Amino acid sequence: MDKPVQLFVPQYRIEECLSEIRTCLETGWTGAGFKTIEFETAWKKYTGLPNCHFLSSATAGLHLAVKLLKISNGWEDDAEIITTPLTFVSTNHAILYEQLTPIFADVDEYLCLDPKSVEKLITEKTKAVMFVGLGGNYGRLDEIAELCRKHGLKLILDAAHMAGTRVDGKHVGFEADVTVFSFQAVKNLPTADSGAICFADPSLDDAARKWSWLGINKDTFSRTLSQGTYKWHYDVEVEGYKYHGNSIMAAMGLVGLKYLDHDNAYRRQICNWYQDLLKDVVDIVPTSNKAESSRHLFQILVENRDQFILALNDLGVYPGVHYRENTAYRMYAQGERNTPRAKEAASRIISLPLHLKLEYSDVTRVASAVQTVLEHTRS
């Protein structure tokens, strides 16, 4: 039997990663320090964003994004953030962490927030919009940004899938008050797990560094570099978290960043192959022509989705689902009435295998399996 075609298979430049990590081990510095600073500098240069703080995960970044916007703007606990139900639960958990209320808007054909649905839900309690670039898709982010400016709302960009997505040559993130990226193992820039938060406001970048290191106002690396008897002195100013990233993950990220554009170009090639093979066969989730997507996902819509996946598994193809709509979970069920399009899409959506180890023969095999299952279900 042919080797199974898996949804995600991370690719690491192993020897280069080991070389970068070796530096950390030889110096004895594996926590937050010179490599995390190096990565932050490299990420700012790559994206053009003014600030970057390297974190343990994107989930940590989303929490800090909501928390620091809440503190700096004086939001009350009953404030609302308009968000999407088509995302991983960490997006919306971050809102609940701060005792705020997620208000679910519907999605458009790109499976990103629909500006018309968002605008209908804006009230005096609305303080921000959380936009998720699902699969790297830009959707109508520019219209959402304009809507936020019009109504005086903050824009949080969950760019977990968007490492390398560009608009007119500019990396996404310039539209938002804060952008959060993921470098988890299966993302386009993979480490074992890490992320980054990029505030537009430098004072919030400073605050994020304090909050991510238990509220301590001087990080260990800075204290190590300083001179004098009192270099170990610090104050604890807030009840922060241990959210900072470490140098091992940053070392891996620095290697991956060198190849990110090249790797994303190949992901787009894979998606073009899928598009050509399946455009007359099945409904394909489109990507916005306003931007060059990172193409983290290639998604199709089918009927009887669960049975469809099992049939693909029988043919050695293992796709995924991104995502079950969050309003299907009891804790978020109150938002279901506003999101019929998201609910319908979530019942049909499949993410086809997409990773750098795929070859054209693998893509044709997946496409052939999709067509075989479709023909079987229609007969």
Image: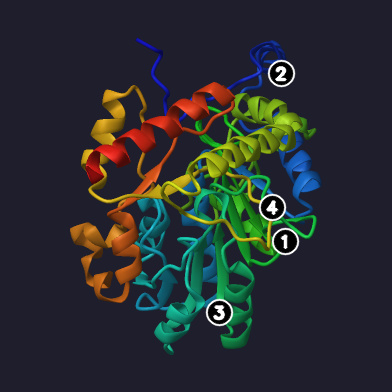
Q: CA distance from mark 2 to mark 4?
A: 30 Å
Viewer-side label of 4, 1: 4
* Residue at figure coordinates x 57%, y 70% from the top left: 155
Q: Please name whichever residue, 339 or 229, is drawn nearer the observer in this view of the structure.
A: 339
Residue 107 quadrant: bottom left
Q: CA distance from mark 3 to mark 4?
A: 26 Å
Q: CA distance from mark 1 to mark 2?
A: 29 Å
* Residue 374, x across and y down, in percent: 31, 41
Which amino acid type is marked by label 4? Glu
Which amino acid type is marked by label 2? Glu
Give the residue pinned by disc 4: 292
Viewer-side label of 1, 2: 2
* Residue at figure coordinates x 61%, y 20% from the top left: 12
- The answer to whether residue 86 shows anywhere in this view is yes
Q: Please name whichever residue, 376 or 85, is drawn nearer the observer in this view of the structure.
A: 376
Which amino acid type is marked by label 3? Leu
- 374 left or right of 136? left
Give the residue pinned by disc 3: 153
* Residue 130, x across and y down, in percent: 49, 66
Which is nearer the N-term, disc 3 or disc 1? Answer: 3
Give the residue pinned by disc 2: 20
Tell me: residue 44, above or below residue 138: above
Which is nearer the N-term, disc 2 or disc 3? Answer: 2
* Residue 362, x across and y down, in percent: 50, 24
Which is nearer the N-term, disc 3 or disc 4? Answer: 3
* Residue 74, x across and y down, in percent: 50, 77
**Which mark is drawn over residue 17?**
none
Q: Secondary structure at mark 2?
A: helix
* Residue at figure coordinates x 31%, y 31% from the top left: 312
**Which mark is drawn over residue 202?**
1
C-beta proximity under 8 Å, tags 2 and 3: no
